[in-house]
Amino acid sequence: MKLKSQLSDYTEAEFMEILNELFNGVSATKENAEEYVISLIDHVAEVTEHPEKSDLLCYPPEGREDS
């Protein structure tokens, strides 16, 4: 998948594809799976510009619905 530089460049389906890749299985090889997942997390944090950055995905606050 080609990553885009801005969230507005993605269709909803394209962005969901990235999130599905993160949470439902990685298509990368075992040798680079960790690096690949980290790069996807960093990319989502960058394009969403969310103030919690990668913590939004990796460490959501207790009590917040995770779905």
Image (tube, rainbow, N blue to C red):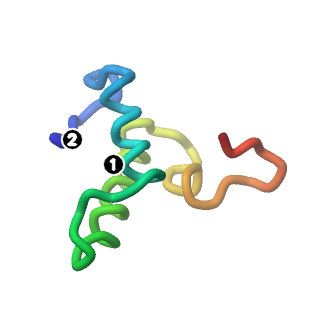
Categorize mark 1 by other alpha carbons within 10 Å: few (<14), some (14-19), many (20+).
Answer: many
Position in image of residue 11 (x %, y %) = 32, 20
Position in image of residue 8 (x %, y %) = 32, 21
Mark 1 near mark 2, Cβ–Cβ under 8 Å? Answer: yes
Vertical side of 65 occupied by 41: above or below: below
CA separation in Å, label 1 and label 2: 8 Å
User: Tag 1, which secondary structure?
Assistant: helix
Vertical side of 25 occupied by 9: above or below: above
What residue is drawn where x is 21% and y is 41%? 3
What residue is drawn where x is 33% and y is 48%? 43
What residue is drawn where x is 74% and y is 54%? 61
Q: Nearer the viewer, residue 27 or 53?
A: 27
Q: Nearer the viewer, residue 46 or 41?
A: 41
- Seen as rendered, the residue at the extreme left is 2
Q: Identity of the amino acid at label 2?
A: Leu
User: Tag 2, which secondary structure?
Assistant: loop
Which residue is tagged 2? 3
Say which label, 1 or 2, has the lower sequence index: 2
Q: Is residue 28 left or right of residue 64?
A: left
Which corner quadrant holds the N terminus? Answer: top left
Position in image of residue 18 (x %, y %) = 35, 42
Q: Is residue 8 left or right of residue 32?
A: right
Q: Nearer the viewer, residue 46 or 23?
A: 23
- The part of the image, by quadrant, that contains residue 51 is top right
Which corner quadrant holds the C terminus? Answer: top right
Q: Identity of the amino acid at label 1?
A: His
Q: How many marks?
A: 2
Q: Is residue 64 left or right of residue 32?
A: right
Marker disc for residue 43: 1
